[in-house]
Image (cartoon, rainbow, N blue to C red):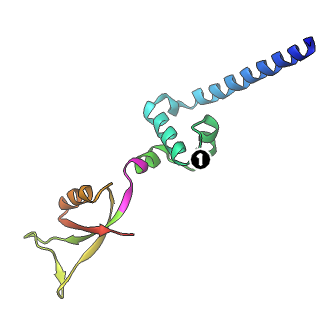
Amino acid sequence: MKEQAKNQKEVSGGLKKIRRHARDKREKDSRFSEATFRQAVRQVLEYLGEEPTYGNFRKYDGIINWEAFAENIRHPTRLALCHILDGQGQEVTVKGTLVVVAREIAACSETEAAEILAKESKVFVKWWQ
């Protein structure tokens, strides 16, 4: 019994060292001092279906721009097809056919896309599939 209790204490002490060691590594990464960075990492890992742990952070850290990925999750970039407006606000045509251009845009809805494109003298037509 005494030997088993001693082994449990050794295992428990070893786990504490491992946890402390993992925390120390995390604290050395200065990016974690910013709340926005921590939130971005958490959001991206959850989006990828991973548990938001430091180990999973390290697994993807070399290949992911955390802030950019999180921003793309919040505001996905899509390809909108749109018509171009001329100086009088009329849709431009070539040989009787409306000119359609594609514009990459960060918008979640057609309404939001239409508002953004209106500032560029364009009219939203539809999303590119």
Compared to residue 128, the image places residue 114 above or below, namely above
Residue found 57% across the figure and 47% down from its top: 49
Q: Position of residue 102 (x, y in %)?
A: 31, 70
Residue found 46% across the figure and 36% down from its top: 39
Residue 35 is drawn in which quadrant? top left
Which element type, helix, strand or loop, lies under badge 1?
A: loop
Q: Does the magenta stretch include residue 74?
A: yes
- Residue linked to disc 1: 62
Can you name the residue that lies furthest to the bottom here?
95
Residue 90 is drawn in which quadrant? bottom left
* Region in magenta: 73-78
Residue found 18% across the figure and 58% down from its top: 119
Q: In this view, does 23 lie to the left or right of 16?
A: left
Q: Is residue 8 left or right of residue 51?
A: right
Residue found 53% across the figure and 43% down from its top: 46
Compared to residue 65, the image places residue 28 above or below, namely above
Can you name the residue that lies furthest to the left here?
88
Can you name the residue that lies furthest to the top here?
2
The foreground one among 57 and 129 is: 129
Q: Say what amino acid the circle numbered 1 marks.
A: Gly
Q: Where is residue 47 in the image (x, y as percent from the top left)?
A: 51, 47
Q: In this view, does 24 lie to the left or right of 46?
A: right
